[in-house]
């Protein structure tokens, strides 16, 4: 069964609301229950052209390329631990991959600080979850298309 509701507040406040609903029995407390934070309608992400430039200005490492493929193939948010498992990395190794990925954007001329991932927290564990934005999905699709022709 899928429950969907809308509320506003900080991530911590939203998680507290979900926890209260679970405690009252309104929402079953299961490992699959997650809080998915959708960006506000006016929030903008980095453009797909900028994303493509950031992803192609320096060759992608094997781990970064594989991380993008996992996120691209996912139907929703992917938990941090699931990324570790899918990539065969330890937690600290994935942190390094994510740090280098972030540096790729921050080091690209014209980066304005807009987000390039959607993020959410797992309701029970607080674990960070990632999802490609539509703009990043377009850029990754271009790159995957180029990779398949070589």
Image: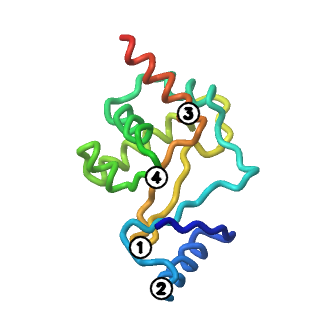
- Marks 1 and 2, how far apart at CA: 15 Å
The quadrant where residue 91 appears:
bottom left
| Residue on which the image places disc 2 | 25
Give left or right: position of 19 versus 70: right
Q: Earlier in the sequence, mark 2 or mark 4?
A: 2
| Residue on which the image places disc 3 | 107
Closest to the camera, between mark 3 and mark 1, is: 1
Name the spot of residue 105 as percent of width and height, x first: 55, 36
Q: Earlier in the sequence, mark 3 or mark 1?
A: 3
Give left or right: position of 46 versus 79: right
Closest to the camera, between mark 2 and mark 4, is: 2
Specify the label residue 77 is tagged with: 4
Q: Earlier in the sequence, mark 2 or mark 3?
A: 2
Helix, strand or loop for disc 1:
loop
- Marks 2 and 3, how far apart at CA: 47 Å
In the figure, 121 relative to 133: above or below?
below
In the figure, 64 relative to 114: above or below?
above
């Amino acid at each position: 069964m899928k429950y969907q509701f809308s509320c506003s507040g900080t991530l911590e406040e939203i998680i507290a609301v979900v926890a209260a609903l679970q405690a009252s029995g309104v929402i079953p407390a299961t490992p699959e229950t997650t809080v998915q934070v959708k960006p506000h309608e006016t929030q903008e992400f980095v453009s797909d052209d900028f994303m493509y430039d950031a992803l192609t200005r320096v060759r992608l490492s094997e781990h970064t390329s594989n991380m993008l493929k996992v996120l691209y193939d996912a139907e929703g948010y992917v938990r941090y631990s699931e990324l570790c498992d899918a990539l065969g990395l330890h937690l600290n190794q994935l942190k390094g991959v994510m740090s280098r990925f972030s540096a790729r954007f921050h080091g690209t001329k014209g980066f304005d600080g807009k987000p390039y991932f959607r993020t959410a927290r797992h309701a029970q564990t607080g674990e960070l979850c990632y999802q490609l934005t539509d703009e990043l999905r377009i850029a990754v699709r271009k790159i995957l298309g180029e990779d398949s022709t070589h």
